[in-house]
Image (spheres, rainbow, N blue to C red):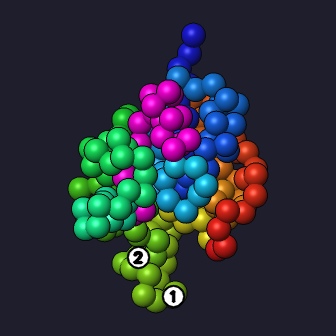
Amino acid sequence: MSNRTLFVGDVHGCAEELDALLTRAAADRIILLGDLFTKGPDPDGVWDLIQSSGAEAIRGNHDDFVLRRWALRGQALAPQPAITWLKSLPLFLEEDGWIAVHAGLHPTEGRAGTDHQTATRVRRWPDDTDEQNPFWWELYHGLPLVIYGHDARRMLQDHRPQTLGLDTGCVYGGRLTGYLLEEDAIISVDARRAYQAV
């Protein structure tokens, strides 16, 4: 039986949609691209699905926010057992032919030149202070394929074979989108509703 690897864009507490996407994909390996628990309706349900599916994940900016709130105020914005798990998450997962990151990479130096801020927050390069700045992926022309989330405003960003952005704004009423690596196929499920305004 062939392997099926599924990458999933920003879940943001949308457990019903994640369950539907996982069921549809029937993947052997699941890689979540960060921003797992905040904003949406069911962080506990997301944690249950992570545990039951054995999903892997990388850390996003909202995961950092969860960890900061826990450290500074003792406020659990995710199920308490998930806090320790979030602390252990890497900024990248990489194998032959692909690299997964929450937001993006340094467009010319790749992973080696990518700091925490870039990995979890970048959209425009070198930063978002000027809307005339290009998006990082417009300047990235290398390999491997970079699979990322983080940018719901621009929805699906399919620039394969260089980059693939999978945040399609599920928590805002859009879709939860995944990428089946071995089939080179994008799949998605509709949000049940908008849980938060854009």
List x then y, in percent, for residue 167: 58, 57
Identify the image quadrant of the C terminus: bottom right
User: Is residue 191 at all visible to an observer of this figure?
Assistant: yes
- Disc 1 to disc 2, C-alpha distance: 10 Å
Residue at 36% x, 35% y is: 95
Which region is colored magenta? Answer: 44-63
Q: Mark 1 points at which residue?
A: 132
User: Is residue 148 at all visible to an observer of this figure?
Assistant: no
Question: Which badge, 1 or 2, is on the more N-terminal residue?
Answer: 2
List x then y, in percent, for residue 4: 56, 25
Residue at 65% x, 50% y is: 176
| Foreground pick, 138 / 90 | 90
Q: Mark 2 points at which residue?
A: 125
| Foreground pick, 141 / 32 | 32
Dot 1: few (<14), some (14–19), or many (≥20) neighbours within 10 Å?
Answer: few
Identify the image quadrant of the N terminus: top right
Residue 135, placed above or below residue 99: below
**In the rendered structure, which amino acid carries the disc numbered 1?**
Gln
